[in-house]
């Protein structure tokens, strides 16, 4: 496929080099370029301008406030605000309004511990303004009569700013606006990072150019640890496969299906006139080669279909119409983002490890890292809990609601 961008940089020095131009890299490029207090030169290096292998291209494009940690809830609430008035937010009246389906998430608790976790998270979400409701069995049966509630104790559901959104359009326009505001994108690949005196000094490109820089931001998604290794830093972020199937039902449901998270680990939701179901691997959930998008034998027949047909008997007769494999940029330490710089290399910045939450977290993370670069601190929302130092200090970030 022809390159979407030029391969050669226009300059030999940039103030900020962003490695990776998918959703996270483009969010940062936009917020930097849009901020009048930042006057540096920005280069975004994207290895594949088609984005065909990116996590952004394989996303299920969901958004939720149903997290158990306050900062994760606030991050998603900002994303909802950001897309609600998207043209004004990005400063372009030609940008479209962003379509969103607020059918929400429905978490189902299968035991007392899971129910207690939902109730605790519900109290926090309510305090922060989310519209989450706790539902007992009678309420679940009334709202979702097609559910088989065997083995279920309770559920939580939110239809305010939660469900599906058009993340692809947001991604396209973030990159478009970043370039219009002066950020430079090239289709190339960083193959080396030069350091001296405890600072990153340069990056080397696949095409041979050596670019000097003021800082480097790692936005390489599932390839983040490859970039970190070039800087001599260990980063526990790895590509892990996640499966998605689109199917048609012989007996469609009579209402929208929220993204229903079953105790089996399978999730399923409405997707236009079809339905979308997804899950982790059937066997070991392990690191994969970032170019490996192969399917695991039996994942549909042995895991996904039995689980959704058990929970929703109307799905006993379905036909798969599409399927794909995507990669989580999975933080094996605690399944949450890694932001900021490691001690001793303060101009190498992480923006990695979102573990399936990246699309909905990109607006707040892009804004936050922009503030860190421009002002040396987070101003809009304190994201310091995601510091790399928690990894070296062995203090995991606690978040119970990871899918």
Image (spheres, rainbow, N blue to C red):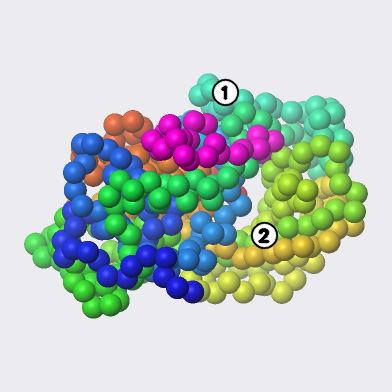
Mark 1, Cα crowd under 10 Å, few <14 / some 14-19 / many 20+, is: some
Q: Is residue 73 visible?
A: no
Q: What residue does disc 2 label? A: 244
Which residue is rendered at x = 71% and y = 74% of the image? 297
Q: Does residue 312 sit above or below 287 in this rendering?
A: above
Residue range in magenta is: 84-112
Q: Is residue 55 visible?
A: yes
| Horizontal and vertical percent position of residue 45 | 32, 63
Q: Give the SS element for disc 2.
A: strand
Between residue 171 and residue 293, name the one nearer to us: 171
Between residue 87 and residue 142, name the one nearer to us: 87
Horizontal relation, residue 174 to residue 189: left or right: right
Horizontal relation, residue 321 to residue 30: left or right: right
Q: Is residue 99 magenta?
A: yes
Q: What residue does disc 1 label? A: 126
Q: Give residue 268's mark.
A: none
Which residue is rendered at x = 43% and y = 57% of the image? 22
Q: Quadrant of residue 34?
A: top left
Q: Give the SS element for disc 1.
A: helix
Which residue is rendered at x = 59% and y = 42% of the image? 165
Spatial CA distance of label 2 from label 1 is 31 Å
Q: Does residue 280 sit above or below 400 in this rendering?
A: below
């Amino acid at each position: 496929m022809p390159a979407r961008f030029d391969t050669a940089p226009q300059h030999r020095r940039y103030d900020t080099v962003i490695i990776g131009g998918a959703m996270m890299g483009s969010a940062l490029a936009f917020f930097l370029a849009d901020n009048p207090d930042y006057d540096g030169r920005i280069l975004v290096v994207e290895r594949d301008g088609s984005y065909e292998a990116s996590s952004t291209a394989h996303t299920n494009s969901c958004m939720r406030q149903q997290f158990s940690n306050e900062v994760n809830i606030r991050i998603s609430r900002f994303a909802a605000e950001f897309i609600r008035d998207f043209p004004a937010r990005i400063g372009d009246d030609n940008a479209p309004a962003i379509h969103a389906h607020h059918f929400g998430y429905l978490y189902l608790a299968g035991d007392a511990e899971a129910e207690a976790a939902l109730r605790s998270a519900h109290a926090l979400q309510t305090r922060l303004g989310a519209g989450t409701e706790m539902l007992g069995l009678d309420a679940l049966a009334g709202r979702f009569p097609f559910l088989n509630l065997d083995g279920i104790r309770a559920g939580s559901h939110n239809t305010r700013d939660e469900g599906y959104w058009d993340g692809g359009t947001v991604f396209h326009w973030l990159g478009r606006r970043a370039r219009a505001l002066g950020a430079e994108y090239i289709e190339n690949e960083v193959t080396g990072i030069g350091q001296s005196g405890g600072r990153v000094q340069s990056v080397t490109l696949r095409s041979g150019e050596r670019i000097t820089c003021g800082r480097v931001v790692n936005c390489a998604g599932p390839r983040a640890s490859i970039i970190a290794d070039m800087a001599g830093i260990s980063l526990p972020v790895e590509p892990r496969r996640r499966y998605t199937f689109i199917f048609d039902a012989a007996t469609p449901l009579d209402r929208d299906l929220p993204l229903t998270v079953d105790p089996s680990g399978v999730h399923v939701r409405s997707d236009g006139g079809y339905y979308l179901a997804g899950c982790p691997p059937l066997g070991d959930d392990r690191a994969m080669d970032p170019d490996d998008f192969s399917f695991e034998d039996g994942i549909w027949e042995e895991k996904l279909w039995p689980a959704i047909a058990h929970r929703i008997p109307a799905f006993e007769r379905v036909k798969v119409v599409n399927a794909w494999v995507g990669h989580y940029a999975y933080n094996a330490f605690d399944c949450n983002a890694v932001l900021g710089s490691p001690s001793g290399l303060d101009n190498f910045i992480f923006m990695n490890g979102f573990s399936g939450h990246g699309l909905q977290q990109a607006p707040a993370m892009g804004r936050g890292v922009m503030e860190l670069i421009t002002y040396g601190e987070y101003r809009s929302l304190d994201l310091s809990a995601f510091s790399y130092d928690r990894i070296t200090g062995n203090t995991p970030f606690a978040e119970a609601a990871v899918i």
